[in-house]
Amino acid sequence: MGKKKQKKLPKLGFLYLDYVLRFFDKSNFKGWPDKIEVVTYHWKNDKARFIKEVKRKKIDILIGNIPATAYETFREIARELPNIQFVPSLDTQFSNKSKENVTRFCWKYNIPVPQTYIFYDREKGDAFIQNTEFPKIVKKSYGPSNYGGYFVHKVSSKQEATNLFKTKKYHPMYMQDFVPMAADVRVMLIGHKPVCAFWRRPPEGEWLTNTSQGGSMDYMDVPVELLELAVKVSKAANAEYWACDIAVGVDGEYRILECATAFAAFPYIRDWIAQYLMWKFSDGRFKKPNIPLFNWEELGKIDSSLLRTMRHIAFGTFSPSYDGAYYMNKKIAVDEQKSIFDVDSQFPMLNTRERDEEEWPSEKWNYQDKYALKNLKSMEVENNQALQDGDESALNAEEISDEEMFSFLSTSTKGFGKKKAAKALETYGKEKLVHMLENEPDQLLDVKGIKEKTMQKMVDAWGTFKQILKGIPPSQ
């Protein structure tokens, strides 16, 4: 009998966006035999061209995360490309757009979150502040991520809350009851299976757990019950890959703080995600990766600088042997009644389910556009580091990560690539470069590789980049 003819593989494409860090590249999809296309979205009036290019390249599956400021545009794009499978789906990426969307997602699926209050009407929000109890947590809902706590504030009084909203212009007014935390845990999942988890604990006397704020982290003894909550959330989102930040309250309760498909991950974790996607898309032609539960306890003992370079880590499947039997029968610290093998088998890596209709259609759920804040310029704005002289577009260096600055420098202008971007960051530092772009662009001519024409293109690109970063959608 002849060999069974292999099913034709779908045409894969990577979805990239200017100035946005790339989650995947071709090296993650090691062994994929066919060409993987690349389609880059250039913002502003690029929708029609982008759709045309996807069709021309005959892509079947478009892989990539979409930032908050492009989310609604890609809702429209996806509707005009009904035969293209977006991975993750636009429904799965609903929580990427805003903290408000995270809350609404959790409310729908009865997932525990801190008590949350969302106001689009300023008068109602102000009235709530006058009658509620403090402390409260105030967060910027829409736009950039947390950046070490920069957009998350603990307010202890009515006056403090009122002053904060006058200064920051956050919209909607997004507040949560303050829940004293012992720690929080970041859990990363692939196919609804936890593949990495670690604790983040605040420094003594503080409440933020971010390591940039002095918090500590470790990988040991993450409770099984907490992992089960992360799996529940991933399944509700129908996520191929997912991350949850789960607060561990001093009351012993677990609550979701954040969840999304866009998260920082070591390269080997992105390799695992790609292996999973190759299995999913190949009808079994590629093997599903075997990623044992609690692998992070051993990998976490490796210095993080080395972990950031490790690639293509693989684990063999269990086969009985004396050593293997000993290891698999060993009781684990988080559940002394069960072996590691027993607990691992409770967390299988699963395929996501197919959906035929939108779960979160923009006509209903796009609150940011339906209830936009009117007359922003008339609001009282106090001078501070983030908003200079009432200019809402001014950017402070704390609002941008080193990685994002590198991505901007290396992609904003043709000819100023990765090597020159790395050299500029090494020579001047992020803070100085942001100052040049914001206040003294002529000083950019001192940077090696930047001429007059390059400087002007970089300054123009900086304006668009700031809009993306600050959650102000560029005109499409």
Image (spheres, helix red, strand yellow):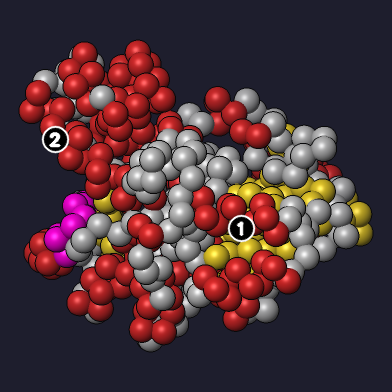
Residue depth check, mark 2 versus mark 1: number of the one nearer the observer: 1
Numbered badge on residue 97: none
In the picture, measured across the screen, residue 424 lies left or right of residue 305, that is left
According to the image, label 2 marks what residue? Answer: 457
Q: Looking at the rendering, which quadrant does residue 199 occupy?
A: top right
Residue at horizontal 60%, vertical 44%? Answer: 149
Circle count = 2
453 is within the stretch colored magenta: no
> Which segment did they paint magenta?
36-47
Q: Amino acid at mark 1?
A: Thr
Residue at horizontal 20%, vertical 35%? Answer: 459
Residue at horizontal 29%, vertical 25%? Answer: 436
Is 404 drawn above or below residue 134 in the view shown?
above
Q: Amino acid at mark 2?
A: Lys
Is 147 drawn above or below residue 448 in the view shown?
below
According to the image, label 1 marks what residue? Answer: 162
* Label 2 close to label 1 by CB (< 8 Å): no
SS at mark 1 in the image:
helix
Q: Looking at the rendering, which quadrant does residue 243 occupy?
A: bottom right
Residue at horizontal 72%, vertical 34%? Answer: 216
* Quarter of the rendering occupied by the N terminus: bottom left
Along the line of sight, which residue is nearer the eye, 220 or 123? 123
In the picture, measured across the screen, residue 144 lies left or right of residue 391, that is right
> Within 10 Å of the Cα at label 1, are there few (<14), some (14-19), or many (20+) other Cα atoms?
some
Q: Position of residue 365 (x, y in %)?
A: 43, 79
Residue 20, visible in the rendered structure: no
